[in-house]
Structure formats: C-alpha cells, structure tokens
C-alpha cells in the first residue's frame, strides 16, 4: 500500500457515483483536506475482521471484495465494491468492529476518511445522511435477497442471477464483456457454490448460448433471457 498524491475531491472522477455528490463546495473542500488516498496492489487487504474502524473508505478507482470466513475456513463474498462505493461504513456507524474483510480484486486507489470528518459532514448535511441511509438500506436488502436465494434457487439460477447482478453493477467494457474479471473460485464464493459446480454450470449455460466466456471475462448476449433463467424480475 502506497500513499498517493492528494486527489482533488471536487474534480474526482467518481464523485457523481458517490454519496458525497450531495456535498456543497465548502464541504467538499473540507473532505478533500482531511481524506488520504492510497494505492493498493491486487490482493491487498484494506481492513480485517475484528479490527475497529477509525473512519470509512471510498473506492476512488478499482474493485474490492468484502468477504467473511465461515466456520469451515471457506471464503464467502458478501458484496463487491467499485468506483464511488463506500466500504467499512456500516461498522463505523454502528461503532462496532468489522464483521468482514475487504480486499482488492485489482489495482485500486482507496480514499480513507477520518471518523470525525464523516460525523461532522453527516451532522451538517441532511442530504448526505439520507443518501448514506439509502446506500445502507440497499446493501441490507441485497444481503437479505442473497440469503433467500441460497435457500430458494437452484445452483443454475443462482449463477445466472450472479452474472446479471455483475452486469448491472459493473457495466461492460469496450468489447461488450462485463467490466470485472472473476476467477471461478471468486464466483463460487459469491454464489455459495463449490468450484466444481461453478465449472459445470458455467459450461452448461455457455453451451446453451446464455453467456459467452473468454477466460475470466463474461458476455451476455440476451440479458432478458438470462434474467428469465435466474427467475429475476426487472
């Protein structure tokens, strides 16, 4: 992890995607003054379970996985974060130790925002408070839905749904592939499936033309058809 030159929050490429888009110019200046930006290599841990937060993190650029380790020592991905997303904020707001780990999936720039700065901004900007509450509610709903799906959906349906969610969350690159590269192990940890099941199911839906695979990249020819397979409602 290396400290980056100061990035200007006002001109941040991810500002429009972040909860901080609600801040006024003088508040952005305060945020810019207090936050510190770090460059992380792929596979570096940003925070660890049981550590106590001293602030929150915002993904300036890159991709991050938030995961837990179950009683069997297996990794379970809780969610994925991208440009503009907050991580570690729920534990900070709850004044609790982290309940998960955060690790970069690729080279990333992560901004750390001290706790006092976060609390000050929340107290003086109601729109920021509401935006963060909305952000938290969506994360909780997604986690609840994932728990339901693990019980109610087949492995095939869960995998199809995961691919659709990745598509909606990360968009596509210039070649039309979903703009995130995940290993089969990552996909298994995201869907709660064994790697063997992931491999078999990926091949199955690929052979049927529901997805196109190119190593770690995935392309969806027909999003509506894949959503039908996943039993998802648009």
Image (cartoon, grey):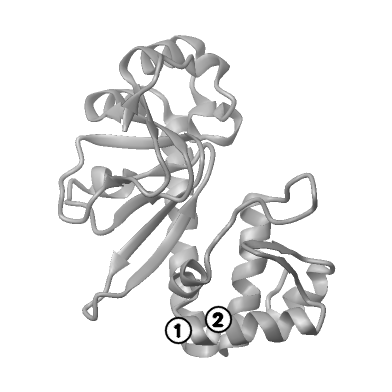
Q: Which mark is residue 131?
A: none
Residue at (46% x, 88% y) in the render? 151
- Indicate the quadrant containing the C terminus: top left, top right, bottom left or bottom right: bottom right
Q: Position of residue 84 (x, y in %)?
A: 52, 36
Residue pointed to by mark 1:
194
Q: Are marks 2 and 1 in contact (CB under 8 Å)?
A: yes
Classify residue 223 as left or right of residue 132.
Answer: right
Classify residue 153 as left or right of residue 91.
Answer: right
Asked whether 191 or 211 is in front, the reply is 211
Q: CA distance from mark 2 to mark 1?
A: 6 Å
Q: Position of residue 15 (x, y in %)?
A: 55, 27
Asked whether 180 or 91 is in front, the reply is 180
Residue at (49% x, 22% y) in the render? 23
Looking at the image, residue 213 lies above or below residue 30: below
Q: Position of residue 109 (x, y in %)?
A: 44, 32
Is residue 231 in view from this perspective?
no
Looking at the image, residue 7 lies above or below residue 134: above
SS of the residue at dot 1?
loop
SS of the residue at dot 2?
helix
Q: Quadrant of residue 56?
A: top left
Classify residue 163 as left or right of residue 146.
Answer: right
Residue pointed to by mark 2:
198
């Amino acid at each position: 992890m290396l400290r980056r030159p100061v990035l200007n929050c006002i001109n941040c490429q991810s500002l429009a995607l972040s909860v901080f888009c609600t801040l006024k110019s003088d508040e952005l200046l305060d945020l810019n003054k207090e936050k510190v930006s770090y460059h992380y290599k792929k596979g570096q841990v940003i925070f660890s379970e049981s550590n106590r937060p001293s602030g929150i993190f915002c993904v300036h650029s890159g991709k991050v996985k938030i995961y837990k380790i179950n009683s069997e020592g297996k990794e379970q991905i809780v969610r994925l974060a991208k440009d503009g997303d907050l991580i570690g904020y729920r534990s900070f707001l709850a004044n609790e130790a982290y309940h998960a780990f955060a690790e970069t999936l690729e080279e990333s720039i992560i901004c750390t925002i001290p706790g006092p700065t976060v609390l000050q901004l929340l107290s003086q900007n109601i729109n920021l408070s509401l935006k963060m509450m909305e952000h938290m509610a969506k994360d909780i709903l997604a986690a609840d839905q994932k728990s339901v799906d693990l019980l109610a959906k087949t492995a095939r349906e869960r995998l199809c749904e995961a691919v659709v969610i990745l598509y909606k969350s990360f968009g596509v690159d210039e070649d039309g592939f979903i703009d995130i590269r995940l290993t089969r192990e990552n996909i298994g940890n995201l869907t709660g499936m064994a790697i063997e099941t992931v491999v078999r199911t990926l091949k199955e839906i690929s052979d049927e033309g529901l997805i196109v695979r190119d190593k770690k990249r995935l392309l969806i020819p027909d999003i509506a058809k894949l959503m039908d397979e996943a039993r998802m409602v648009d």
